[in-house]
Amino acid sequence: MKKLIAITLGLSLMASLMCQPFTTKEENLEWWKDARFGMFIHWGPVSIKGTEIGWSRGREMPVAEYDTLYKQFNPVNFNALEWVKIAKAAGMKYIVFTSKHHDGFCMWDTKFSDHNIMNSPFNRDVMKELAEACKKENIALCFYHSTCDWHNPDFPLTSPGGSVRRTTSNIDRYTEYLKNQSVEIIKNYGPLLVMWYDVPQEFDSIRGQGVINRIREIQPDILVNNRTGAKGDFDTPEQRVGGFQNTRPWETCMTIARQWAWKPNDELKSLEQCLHSLIRTSGGDGNFLFNVGPKPDGTIEQSQVERLKEMGVWLNKYGYTIYDTRGGPFKPTDWGVSTRKGNKIYLHILKWYSDSPKIFIPDIGMKIKSYRLADGGKVNMTKQDGGYLIEFNANLLQPISTIVEIEVFGNAMDINPIDSI
């Protein structure tokens, strides 16, 4: 009977988390690493002004003005299903949405604060609609939730940028508020893949671990990043691609333009910049969380949508070299990166240094069975002292990444990471 109950609970959890085949935190983490690519969404009433979420409170605009923007917030064109379909078209496997940023405004129907979306003219639970859309489209759901809160009088610091210390505060009472809201989110919209906290400020590792322990009482397998003050499950380099690291999971978070929240006429990254960031992150054995900032009407800017769809077109063709892979065995270098799975190694050559395209890779200590371009073309591979010289036909080079597929006799994951040149 106990076995039947366990199986039933496992199947129920699997169904609610869509296509994620896990029942433990460790399996959850492996699914997340396989997924590799997610959508970050920063959105709130601040989009009305086009300034940065949280940070512009008390800086670009007075606190009183910032805190009352929600009274004008009515994103009548918001469509959660459309957002999720855009993420799918981009090849993204999970979504991380801002439930509450540092400004303290809550994007769901919370019972712990009146400073929330239900008291705006919009009066709809954005997170509920997003959760339903993610479930329908088999996209894993996560929430960003600010550890600090410059609006809450119990948090010791306030705006601008958490640089002002309140004369009175109660960090213990605020900690309970943070825990209660986190539990509320998981119960109402979970189970979730990740709770993604940010900017701990006054939270140390003990206080931060207390938050993690509390939410794991509700969902034991949930993943948590490293921004509660405690170590969590993975690191989070920001606005840069992390270095090679396969001893601890990590995820680069980066904006598709310059600002996290929507900004009129913001500078959009080129397709090459976007895909190179994704490819280099994968080659370093990390995940790539790519941010969009919806407009005040609830839509994602069309230029951003088109860029994401272009990424999806590339991934539809070459995603097998990104998804389900691990970084290496060659550590990232100037010319590019490598990924691997099973008996395959994928070299992503992103940059050339001469008119005669060639690269050198060190000896991997494993016999090579075959090698070819991902598009089926031929390359020349010559054994030399300490490794292999790979030479390319210039007419076969690809604009984003020229990919070489190497098949080895053995498991490519058994190769220790190697420094390349």
Image (spheres, rainbow, N blue to C red):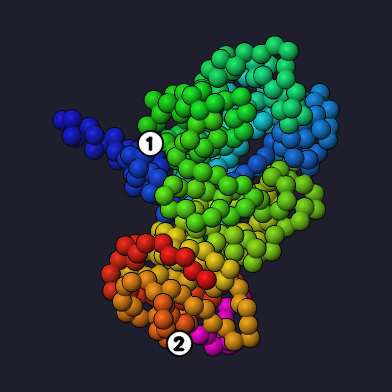
- Does residue 398 appear left or right of residue 104 in this picture? left
Q: Position of residue 279 (x, y in %)?
A: 54, 63
Q: Residues within 10 Å of mark 1 (few under 14, many from 20)?
A: many
- Residue that badge 2 annotates: 380
Please state the extent of the stretch shown in magenta in the rendering: 391-399
**How far, Cα to Cα, is label 2 from label 1?**
47 Å
Check disc 2 and report its element: helix, strand or loop.
strand
Locate the N terminus by quadrant: top left
Residue contact between numbered discs 2 and 1, judged by CB atoms under 8 Å: no
Dot 1: element: loop
Residue found at the very far left of the displayed protein: 1
Name the residue nearer the viewer: 136 or 9: 9
Q: Residue at x 22, y 32 (%)?
A: 5
Q: Nearer the viewer, mark 2 or mark 1?
A: 2
Q: Is residue 298 above or below residue 163?
A: below
Residue 132 seen in render: no
Label 1 amino acid?
Asp
Query: Is residue 250 within the magenta segment?
Result: no
The dot on residue 221 is 1
Quarter assignment of residue 96: top right
Residue 72 location in percent, x, y?
A: 78, 31
Q: Where residue 411 sits: x, y (%)?
A: 30, 66
Q: Nearer the viewer, residue 300 or 405?
A: 405
Three-letter amino acid code of the residue under disc 2? Asn
Which of the two labelled residues, at mark 2 and mark 1, occupies the earlier sequence position?
1
